[in-house]
Structure formats: C-alpha cells, structure tokens
Image (spheres, rainbow, N blue to C red):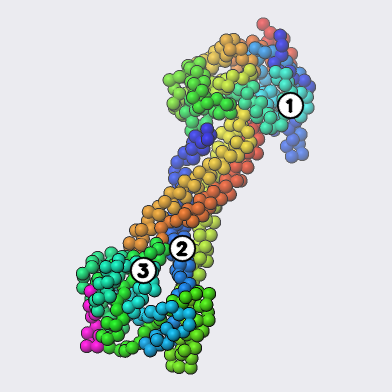
Amino acid sequence: MKYLHLVWAALLRRKTRTAFTLLSVLAAFLLFGMLDAVRTAFDAGTNAAGADRMIVSSRFSIIQPLPYSLLSQIETVPGVKAVAYANWFGGTYQDPKNFFPNFAISPNYLDLYPDIVLPPAERKAFDATRTGAVVGATLAKRFGWKIGDRIPLIGSIFPKRDGDSTWTFDLVGIFKARDAREAGLEQQMLFHWKYFDEANAYYRNQVGWYIVKVADPAQSDRIAQAIDRLSQNSDHETRTETEQAFQLAFAKQIGDIGLIVGGIMAAVFFTLLLLTGNTMAQAVRERVPELAVLKTLGFSNRVVLLLVLAESVLLVALGGVLGLGLAALLLPAVNAAAGGQIVLPPVGLATWTLGIALMLLIGLVVGALPALRGMRLNIVDALAGR
Amino acid sequence: MTALVEIRKLSKTYVRGKQKVEVLHGVDLDIAAGDFLALMGPSGSGKTTLLNLIGGLDTPSAGSITVGGQRIDQLGSGALARWRASHVGFVFQFYNLLPMLSAQKNVELPLLLTRLSAAQRRKNAAIALQLVGLQDRATHKPTELSGGQQQRVAIARAFVSDPALLVCDEPTGDLDRQSAEEVLTLLRRLNREHGKTIVMVTHDPKAAEHATHTLHLDKGELVETAAMAH
Ligand SMILES: Nc1ncnc2c1ncn2[C@@H]1O[C@H](COP(=O)(O)OP(=O)(O)OP(=O)(O)O)[C@@H](O)[C@H]1O
Ligand SMILES: [Mg+2]
C-alpha cells in the first residue's frame, strides 16, 4: 500500500485522458447496472411465482371467457384447495394512454394471493363495498389517489349496461407487494367481479380465468389434466398450467431478455477493453523512462508489473463503482419517470458482485500487456531512449 | 588502500542484429574506497557503458566486477535490483526525477524498498534535502525547480539510502557554470565528509578538477594519461 501514491501519480499524470477514460468506464457500468436491473426484473416474473397456483384459461385465447358454471365443477376436482376467478377489464383513467392492469376479482381472490398485502381494515371495507376498489401503492402514487377517492375509469372494452362507459369506483384500500421483487403487482387495480358482472353490457356469468390453489404442488400435473377433462369436447375447452409456465410463455413473447442484455453488454465491454487498453498502452509508453528510473533504484520487475496492473485495475474500478453507483441512484428516477409501467429492482448484491468481478477482470486484462512491457523493459536501453 | 570496486578483464559486446559491437575490451580497474574518480573520454568511447556495469544496471559479456567484496557480474536481475537498492546511488545528466512527485516524494522513492516506516522515510528524506540545501523546496514538483535544483534533488535521492557508491553520468552536462559548481561542490562534500566513493563521467575538464583522480577511456580501453598528471 505504500506504493499507492505512485499509482495515483501515474493516473493524474494526464488528467484529461484519465477523466475521459473514467467517463467511458462509468458509462459502460451505468448501462450494465441498468440492463442487469431489466434482466432481474424479468427473471423475477418467472421465479417468484408460487408453484402451488395454477391458471385455467381458454385453450384458444386468453380473451375468450369461460362459463361461471365451471367454478363448482373445478372445486370438486380432488386435490383442489380453493378456486378464485378474475376478468380482465382494461379500463383507462382520463387518457387512453394511461395504461395499467385492472381487473375484476372474485371475493376470495386476495386469499389466494398472499403476495398482495392489504391492511385487514381495508380488506374489510373492500368486502363490504359493492363498487369498492383496491389499488397498488405504485399506482396510487402515480395518479395521486387516496382512500375515499371516487375513481372514474373508461370501460373502453366493457361499457355499462345503461350505455354509459364511465365506471365509478370507490377507493377503499391501497396494497403493497409482499416481496420487492414482485413490485409489479403494485401497479394493479382490483375490484369486485360481481359489480362488473351485473353492470357490464356484454358478459353475464362469465369469467376470464380461474386461479386454482392445489394442496400438493407435486400433484399439479394430474390435477391440471383432471380440470381440462371437465370441458373436453365442449365449446369452452380449457388449458390449465402453473402460473410460472403461464408467465414464462408471456415473457418469451418479448424475447430472451437475458440473451439480449448479454449481447449488448458483451459489445459494450469489448469496446471498453479496446479503449482502456489503448489508454493503458499509451500511459505506459510515455512513462518508459520513469519506469526505468524505478528499476534503476532497485524496484523489482514484480513490483513494476504490479504497479501498472494496479493502475489499470484502479482506473476501471473507480469508473465502474461510480457507474454502478449512479445506476443505483438513477433507477428510482427511471421507475418514477416510467410512471410505474415498469418497475426495475434496485441494484442488488448480485449485480454489485458481478460488476466488481467484471471490473477486476477488465482491469487485469487491459493492464496485462502494458504491465509485461514495463516489467521486461531494459533499463540501459530505456535510459538511453532507445 | 582497499579497493571498493575491482574490475578485471571486463568486456562488453552489444549485438545488434548480425553486427557485434565490442564497446569495452578487457578493462582492468581498481577504485579505492573513498575515491572520487572522474572518467573522461570522447563520445562513444564506452564511458556510460562502463558506469552502467559498475552500477549493476547491465551485465558484462566477459570479465568480473567485484564491489565491496561481492561479485555482481553473476547476479540475476532480481538479485541485482536488490543489490542496487542498498549499495549504489545514481545521478544522471537529465536528473530523471518523477515529474508527478514532489521533491520530498522523489527523495523518498529508494526508501520505499527498505523496512523504514512512513514517518522514518519522511524524516530521512527531509534530512537529505536539507543536506543539499533544498529543505524549503520539499513540496515543489520538478517542473517548479531549476535544473541545478533538480539535480540536487536527484543527488539527495541517490544518497538517501546511504549507499557506499555513487555513480554519476555527466551530472553537470545540462547545467550552467554556476549550478554545475554547486553540484560539484555538493558531490565533493559527500565524498570528503560522508565518505561516499564516487565515479563520475564528465566531458568537462573543470568538473574533473573536483575529483581526486581522472581516468581516460578511448575506444573501450583505459589509456595512460601522463599529460593529465599534475
Ligand atoms: N544497447 C546498445 N546497443 C548497441 N550499441 C550500444 C548500446 N549501448 C551503447 N552502444 C554503443 O556503444 C558505444 C559506447 O556507448 P556509450 O554510451 O558507453 O558511450 P559514451 O562514452 O557514454 O558516449 P557519450 O559521451 O556520447 O555519452 C557507442 O558506439 C554506442 O553506440
Ligand atoms: Mg554516455
């Protein structure tokens, strides 16, 4: 550590060049922090889902409704512990661009989703209010809603039976996600299926999908088959799959996010390698006489090698930590700017670990050749400027 | 008088591609402990080459060099580096200070290789700077010092770790008369008062007058210099 001031001195020798290199390292790791958050956000969608829940939807299309009469039949299938249901509403608030997930749910829906945390008093109020609605905290913040507000949604898909397309809901509760990784839940708005079913112009006694809680996840395959047999050869055949499979299929429609993120980062880091590699090569080239002086004074080849390596690792680590730190600071702002449409998780331990490993690796790779050059340099030739 | 440096049949050949250049041919030389030797000779005669060999910066093609009873011509590069750190100090024509470090930090450089604590390193470097009369310039960077001052900082760096031998390659070659005199006076004090053995290459007869002996090198051989003897 007593050599540290030599490493600093080397970096400060060309302040502008060091600043620019630092900036590009910073930019690369800022991007890394952001993209890794995107990747984590998508991974969470597939990982966090409980394997004890299954989704029953139409075999043909998610927008094709299923009859309400199926409920009692599914409930009798052995191994089924509870059945809830929901219907997509697709209402918008004030402006059609203000998209957020909103749907009508059965009275026991929240019991099947312990992931959604609603204070008991608000749950009670919800159960007691026919036109009641509960929203996630993110959504409430986005539109500045408070409990007691009356919220008009435009039912662009489902107008009311009286021809009016404005549905008014009484906000009675604001819920949170149990786990930060499921923060996406907090963008939802939920209200009573009964209200929806009675008041909408088109559907009667129909539900969008059923949610089935099984007693033993190991039995879920058998139970799924039994449920799908109920509607075999009818006009409303079902497909029952785990929630995880359901979400995985959805995420795959967007593309393999991991692969895309990996590809972008590989390109960015490759460019970074060339850039910092060039900086380091230049830095050592112009310092050849100085390194020769150190060796003259008795600094060993090993110490000279380590000095140059430390210089490049410090350069990359400094820019990298600043970049990742900036990403950590900016992510909440990005989430706020996105108005809750996407919720990126904070820069976590895994990202920091991977990031720091990458910084060390890049620093070492980039420093290796210049360091070897410094180590092998012949004192007499270098002093004579040969 | 005991010889600090004993050189026997020393040869140095540089190989450049297929060409071989024999720069030194069988040089024999004893340098007594406490001597201040001036080494003169025409350009290209091999003065720097000889000095680099004595200081352990380079290894000979043939012959032997013994310094303080230790053969240094057979040491590997690691052992040679360790030997240089504790036995020899270097002064060059162009000072060769590290431009980013203050005078104080430049002088402390050789002490980084010792077991001294940071406080001791600071103290020893301060004493060395005081000895060359630059204690008030300790925080200055080389660019903020005159050539003569830079060379005095370089001299402080050369003796701060208390080596027995100082090798100086044209230490006044880049200085005006006045600064050169200051530097030479300083070297003479180090020789007389601190017992440093000094080998100095110079083109300047006036500089050589400060030395106790002068030797001439011509085409890689030491020549008799009866004409120079007073
Ligand atoms: N590394 C080397 N490779 C090839 N030739 C070399 C090398 N070092 C020195 N020489 C040659 O050896 C000869 C002596 O060089 P040296 O530097 O010792 O001379 P010098 O007496 O110090 O000269 P000057 O007074 O100009 O400094 C020169 O001809 C030089 O070209
Ligand atoms: Mg020379």
Q: Which residue is mark 3?
A: A116
Residue A290, percent from left and from top: 56, 33
Chain ID of residue with mark 3: A
Examine the rendering and report whether any part of residue A283 can be seen. Answer: no
Residue A250 lies, with reference to residue B15, above or below; the image says below
Q: Which residue is mark 2?
A: A40
Choose between A148 and A165: the one closer to the eye.
Answer: A148
Residue B24, percent from left and from top: 74, 25
Disc 3 secondary structure class:
strand
On the same chain: label 3 and label 2?
yes
Choose between A256 and A9: the one closer to the eye.
Answer: A256
Q: CA distance from mark 3 to mark 1?
A: 80 Å
Q: Which residue is mark 1?
A: B73
Question: In the image, which is nearer the foreground, mark 3 or mark 2?
Answer: 3
Q: Which residues are magenta?
A: A160-170
In the rendered structure, find residue A15 and report the number of the disc placed on it: none
The kind of residue on which mark 3 rests is Ile
At horizontal 22% and vertical 88% (from top left) the residue drawn is A162
Query: Does the segment drawn in magenta span residue A163?
Result: yes
The kind of residue on which mark 2 rests is Thr
Answer yes or no: disc 2 within 8 Å of ligand 1: no
